[in-house]
Image (tube, rainbow, N blue to C red):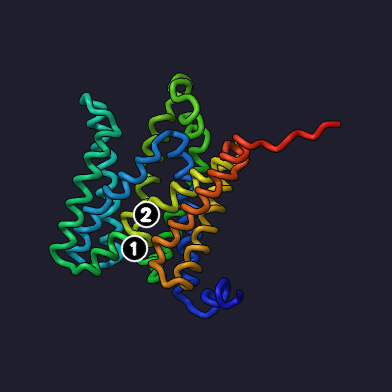
C-alpha cells in the first residue's frame, strides 16, 4: 500500500512537483469553475481553453517550448477571443455562445497547423495534453502567482460576482461594479486556463476547473462550501490521478482529469444534493 500510494511522492521529485502543480491549479481554477457553472457558462471554459492554442502555438513557433512566450501568447489569444466574442455578441445578431463556438473551432484548427509547421508529433502531443510530470521551478512559480492573483481578485470582487450570478439586473440597478467584475472574471478565466495549459495542455486545461465544480454541486449547500468542496475534489483528483498514472503507466494529465470524472459520476449517483440515489430512493424517515 505504501509503495502504491505514498512511495512515488517520497522517491521521485517529479511526482512531488506534479502534485504541487495539481494542488495549486485546484486552488485557483476550481473557484473559477464554480462561478462559470453558476453563470451557466460551463462550456465557455472549454471554448476558451482551445482559444489560447493559437497564441501559445505562435510562441512555440518563434521561441520553442519556452515558458514566457507560451504564457504571453496564450494570454493574448485568450483575451482577444474573449473580447472579440463579446463585441460580436453585442453588435451583431449572433449570440455569445455561438460566437465562442466559432472562435473555438477556428482557434483549434489554426493552433494545430501552426505547431505542426515546426514541431514533431511529440511536440503537438505535449501542447495538446500538457506535461504535468515535467513542471520545473519557473512553471510552478507561474502557477502559484496566477493562483495568488485569482484568490486576491475573488476576495475583492466576491460580492458583485455573486450578485451577478443571482440577479444581474438587480446588480446593475444598485451598482456600477457589474461590468468591471465581469471583465475581471473573464481575465481570471483566461489566466487560469493558461496555467492549466502548462500542466494539462489545451485540450484538458479546463478539466480541473469544471469537473470538480460540477461534482461539488451534489454535495454543497451554499456557495462557500461549494467552492471549498470543489477545491477539495480538485486536489483529490490530482493525487489519485497521479497515483493511477504511476501504477498503471497511463498518461498523467488525462489520468488526473479521468479521476475528476470518476468523482463526478460518484457524486451524480450518491450526492445528497440532487444525486440519483437520494432523489429516487430516499432514506425512510424515522418515526417516534
Q: Residues within 10 Å of mark 1 (few under 14, many from 20)?
A: many
| Vertical order, 193 against 219 (above or below) | below
Q: Residue 130 has which mark?
A: 1
Rendered residue at 60%/40% (across/down): 277
The residue identified by callout 2 is 205
User: Among all residues in the image, which is located at the extreme right?
Assistant: 288
> Which picture quadrant has residue 203?
bottom left
N-term mark: 2 or 1: 1
> Residue 16: image x %, image y %?
50, 71
Q: Residue at x 42, y 72 (%)?
A: 249
Residue at the spot 45% in from the left edge and 38% down from the top edge = 37
Contact? badges 2 and 1 (CB < 8 Å): yes
Horizontal side of residue 7 vs 72, given as left or right: right
Q: Position of residue 218 (x, y in %)?
A: 56, 41
Q: Position of residue 55 (x, y in %)?
A: 23, 53
Vertical relation: 178 (above or below) 21: above
Q: Nearer the viewer, residue 113 or 13?
A: 113
Residue at disc 2, secondary structure: loop
How many numbered discs?
Answer: 2
Left or right of 222 on screen, residue 46 = left
Amino acid at each position: 500500500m505504501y509503495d502504491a500510494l505514498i512511495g512515488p511522492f517520497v522517491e521521485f521529485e517529479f511526482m512531488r512537483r506534479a502534485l504541487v502543480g495539481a494542488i495549486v491549479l485546484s486552488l485557483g481554477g476550481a473557484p473559477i469553475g464554480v462561478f462559470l457553472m453558476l453563470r451557466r457558462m460551463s462550456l465557455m471554459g472549454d471554448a476558451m481553453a482551445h482559444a489560447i492554442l493559437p497564441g501559445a502555438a505562435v510562441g512555440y513557433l518563434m521561441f520553442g517550448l519556452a515558458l514566457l512566450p507560451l504564457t504571453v501568447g496564450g494570454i493574448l489569444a485568450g483575451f482577444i477571443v474573449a473580447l472579440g466574442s463579446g463585441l460580436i455578441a453585442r453588435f451583431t445578431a449572433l449570440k455569445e455562445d455561438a460566437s465562442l463556438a466559432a472562435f473555438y473551432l477556428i482557434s483549434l484548427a489554426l493552433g494545430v497547423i501552426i505547431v505542426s509547421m515546426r514541431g514533431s508529433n511529440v511536440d503537438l502531443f505535449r501542447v495538446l495534453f500538457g506535461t504535468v510530470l515535467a513542471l520545473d521551478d519557473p512553471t510552478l512559480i507561474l502557477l502559484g502567482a496566477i493562483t495568488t492573483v485569482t484568490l486576491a481578485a475573488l476576495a475583492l470582487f466576491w460580492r458583485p460576482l455573486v450578485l451577478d450570478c443571482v440577479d444581474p439586473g438587480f446588480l446593475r440597478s444598485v451598482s456600477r461594479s457589474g461590468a468591471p467584475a465581469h471583465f475581471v472574471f473573464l481575465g481570471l478565466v483566461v489566466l487560469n486556463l493558461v496555467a492549466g495549459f502548462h500542466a494539462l495542455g489545451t485540450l484538458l486545461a479546463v478539466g480541473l476547473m469544471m469537473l470538480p465544480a460540477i461534482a461539488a454541486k451534489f454535495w454543497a449547500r451554499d456557495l462557500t462550501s461549494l467552492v471549498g468542496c470543489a477545491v477539495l475534489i480538485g486536489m483529490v483528483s490530482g493525487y489519485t490521478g497521479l497515483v493511477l498514472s504511476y501504477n498503471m503507466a497511463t498518461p498523467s494529465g488525462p489520468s488526473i482529469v479521468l479521476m475528476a470524472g470518476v468523482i463526478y459520476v460518484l457524486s451524480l449517483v450518491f450526492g445528497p444534493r440532487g444525486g440519483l440515489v437520494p432523489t429516487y430512493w430516499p432514506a425512510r424517515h424515522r418515526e417516534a
